[in-house]
Image (cartoon, rainbow, N blue to C red):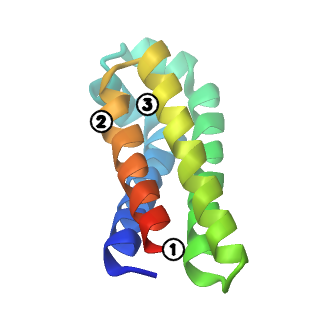
Amino acid sequence: MHPAATALTVLVILIHLYIVVLEMVLWRSRGPKVFGITPQFASDSAALASNQGLYNGFLVVALLLGLVLREPFATAFVFYGLGCVVVAGLWGALTASRQILYVQALPAALALAAQWLAR
């Protein structure tokens, strides 16, 4: 695997690890500042945020498997994980915040392109 493709994929993993921790552990304390929501809304939506965090965790696992497994599984997991992140980022940008396009979808799209070019 090409070093740039690996580095970009690791960046996506780190971004999503942060999202997992933010949504599952720090939602009530950091969620209001990061997402511009009220503390009351953060408290009311904590269970939903935790569920979202779990799904982001599954994406992290898929990407990690893609980096540690041998072929043909590595490619399948990396492309699946990065593809899911791109789609989720596009959907989030359309439905929640345009910032998601730059924080989530763009790094994943760059990693996906680098992975495709490296193969």
Q: Residue furthest bottom?
A: 70
Mark 1 Cα-neighbour bin, 10 Å: few <14, some 14–19, many ≥20: few
Q: Position of residue 55 (x, y in %)?
A: 65, 44
Q: Position of residue 42 (x, y in %)?
A: 46, 21
Q: Amino acid at mark 1?
A: Arg
Which residue was labeled with disc 3? 28
Label 3 and label 1: CA atoms lie apart by 42 Å
Which residue was labeled with disc 1? 119
Quick check: marks 2 and 1 in contact, CB under 8 Å?
no
Residue 95 in the figure: left or right of residue 5: right
Q: Earlier in the sequence, mark 2 or mark 1?
A: 2
Q: Nearer the viewer, mark 3 or mark 1?
A: 1
Asked if 29 appears above or below 80 in the picture, the reply is above
Which residue was labeled with disc 2? 102
Q: Nearer the viewer, mark 2 or mark 1?
A: 1
In this view, the residue in front, 77 or 49, is 77
Label 2 and label 3: CA atoms lie apart by 24 Å
Q: Residue at x 66, y 65 (%)?
A: 77
Q: Residue at x 55, y 34 (%)?
A: 88
Residue 32 in the figure: left or right of residue 74: left
Q: Nearer the viewer, mark 2 or mark 3?
A: 2
Quick check: marks 3 and 1 in contact, CB under 8 Å?
no
In this view, the residue in front, 53 or 15, is 15
Label 2 and label 1: CA atoms lie apart by 25 Å
